[in-house]
Image (spheres, grey):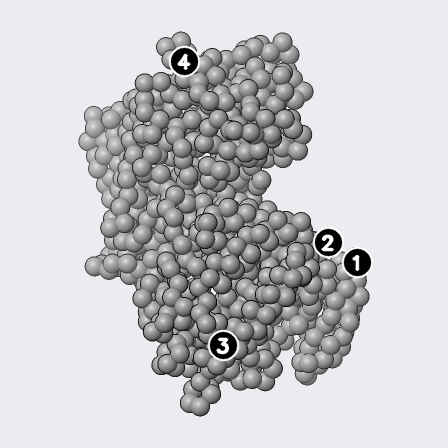
Amino acid sequence: MRARHQACVYLTVVLLLISCAAGAAGNTNSDLLTKPWSAKWIAPPKFSPFEFGVYHFRKTFDLPAKPASFVVHVTGDNRYQLYVNGVRVVWGPARGDLNHWRYETVDIARYLKPGKNVLAAVVWNYAQHAPEAQATNQTGFLLQGDTKTEQVVDTNNSWKFLRNESYRPLPVTHGEMRGYFVAGPGEEINGGAYPWGWERIDYDDTSWLAAVAGSAGAPRDASDGPNRWMLVPRNIPLMEEKPERLQSVRQSNGVTVPVTFPSEKNPFQIPAGTKAQLLLDQTYLTTAYPELIVSGGKGAKVSLRYAEALYLPGAQRGGKGNRDQVEGKTFVGYRDTFIADGGAGRLFRPLWWRTYRYVELSVETEGEPLTIEDVRGVYTGYPFERRARFDADSERLTKILDVGWRTARLCAHETYMDCPYYEQLQYVGDTRIQALVSLYMTGDDRLMRNAIAQINDSRTAEGATMSRAPTRQQQYIPPFSLWWVGMVHDYWMYRDDPEFVRQMLPGVRAVLSFFSAHRSEKQLLGQMPWWNFIDWTKQWKGGVPPAGADGTSAPVNLQLLLAYDWAAEMENALGSKALAADYRSAAGELRAAIQNTYWDGTERMLYADTPDKKNFSQQTNALAVVAGLVKGDDARELVARIIPDVSLVQASIYFKHYLHSAVNVAGEGDRYLDLLGEWDAMLARGLTTWAETADPSRSDCHAWGASPNYELFRTVLGIDSAAPGFQRVRIRPFLGKLAKASGAIPHPRGEVAVSLSLVNNKLTAEVNLPEGVAGEFVWRGITRPLAPGKSRIVL
């Protein structure tokens, strides 16, 4: 909750802050990275620091003049928002774990003035209702001035405190949401108990109590840190926020609304003693802070519920039908509730953002009419900028790219997220695909670096990473540890940052050591612990493929083979050549064992999932091609067999990324555009983001479905890295049925642009490479060198 601000002013402040924060982070007191801070963690007195609560802290101080610079470092547990003289200037912390607790650095000088100034913060602890991705120790707030000048505002017992009694959590159950839901609670806010104006400079805080000062803030590198929060600087930018409006009223009961509402601000009144309900449609899925502004109507209860789509009558998980249709359907979604206090222009905004296409607005007034001044949203997400371009004169492909871009953006916040509605967790399997999409579409590698480091930090003593990070529940999916090795290799190939990759090599070694300990005398992996998820299929319970009597499973062994090959390449270039040789030897033994155990060369001419050769899948055979177990014409023939064979376990939306990679690797990329039928089907069903699985699907937004935003550039335009750091470029296009295609992707040194035209079976290609970057162009087995700058090739 905060005071009302005009959207345009608010957006300007956000943009100024992003610039300000970026500059401040690079010029901070180096002692704060290694020595305990002078600021103390502060907490509310009288209340348990482990229970649900929303708290306000204030610090009043005087300045003789407006400073040119005033840098502070700030963090909180679970979350905080910091205001300076009534303006919200920074919020966080960026999600991490207790061993890597982030703090934000911001120069607040532009918000200060001569004389009296006020810093004010709201800090909340969701306690047992916290999102699964939210680490926590206990309620706390910390603000540290960068130098002695700024340390006048350090948190200690000179700060004042107030518990906000207006908040109550609205827990959400899995059953209520018809599926696994761990994204945090809704909120009920009683406007009559809310301390309106608490963040303003003129607010009277004389009745507030002194905060309790605890241990000093301590950076991760400090000796014997005095608390469990080991502080590290935020390593990603602040999230983007921009106003956006709901577009239409799809259903209305008990009230007539203006025809321009909600696409335009147009107040309307709900009479006293009335029950009214509106179904509002954003027309596309979004992640946003909903904002409701009301006047009057003391005691009126206003509820906002949020849904990706409505459910068909009687349907359980996933029975949604066409997402554009609402008639006769059931609304299922979590909610926020606001109780009006009768004041004018009251702005209700939840502490955390929501995911929705549809918003159900329900109002029950008491003895006074309630005026709905406005209902709107403020989009939020990681500030990716779309830099890639693609044009094939195809409305279909343009739509697929646009929907994929929205999907990728909604699943990228302070971490990558599998889905923004249900879980908001950074799973490795999802994240590897998301990171590739980010690199090709934006060139921004910061969220990918953050993900690789967080997953590395989650490793157990045995060496495996957790399936997702950050997370409070220790969940392990061993194959995801292998995809993490793939993420490190991806980063090495596409980004010119060998030092970061070198820092990850001990983690890669630990992962492979964990798997080596589970290899049998036959060199194959035996029974693996935990959840060995590979892909969501109807035939595989819990996504786990069948295994032999000794626990051996082809897809898991093929992922290990890939990891050995990736690790050998990285060790040879950046680490231990002896280890590289060991990994190559292990890969050779494993390759032979897989071939001997799983290849059915008599009947199916396919790789089986199990040694008894009774189970077969697209997943296993796609991995065999990607891992180089089969090459050349044999790989092409294998791909040609597995695509139409409906008797095989079919790859889901997630694993189609690897199926399509196999198509590319085998040289069958001309098939790719004909393999997007599931994406066409999702568009036909009215989805505006890509679903988790084919219908029935729990989640309507899973970024692993955005793989076309990678493959259209890598396969159709053919742009790929041919050397670590993208120091060489390989262009191997597959136009399929297209007559022309053009586009570009960002590169560490600029941009790689390609234009292709196929007329009478003659290809004309124009390629523009960054300065100092050479490469090769490959078309139907013919290779031509590419020099830096512009090249024109006719084949």
Which amino acid lies under the numbered mark 4 shown in the image of this protein? Ala
Distance in Å between CA atoms under marks 4 and 2: 53 Å
Residue 550: where, in percent of width, then height?
36, 72
Q: Nearer the viewer, mark 4 or mark 2?
A: 4
Residue 364: where, in percent of width, then height?
23, 34
Residue 434 visible (yes or no) = no
- Residue named by callout 4: 210
- Please indicate whether residue 157 sits to the left or right of residue 723 in the image: left
Q: Nearer the viewer, mark 4 or mark 1?
A: 4
Callout 2 secondary element: loop
Which amino acid lies under the numbered mark 2 shown in the image of this protein? Arg
Other residues around mark 1 within 10 Å, as few (<14) / some (14–19) / many (≥20): few
Distance in Å between CA atoms under marks 4 and 3: 69 Å
Q: Earlier in the sequence, mark 3 or mark 1?
A: 3
Q: Are marks 4 and 3 in contact (CB under 8 Å)?
A: no
Q: Quadrant of residue 34?
A: top right
- Residue named by callout 2: 749
Q: Nearer the viewer, residue 47 or 682?
A: 47
Numbered label attached to residue 772: 1
Distance in Å between CA atoms under marks 1 and 2: 8 Å
Distance in Å between CA atoms under marks 4 and 1: 61 Å
**Residue beneath the point at 28% across and 58% down:** 317
- Please indicate whether residue 257 sits to the left or right of residue 383 in the image: left
Other residues around mark 3 within 10 Å, as few (<14) / some (14–19) / many (≥20): some
Callout 1 secondary element: loop
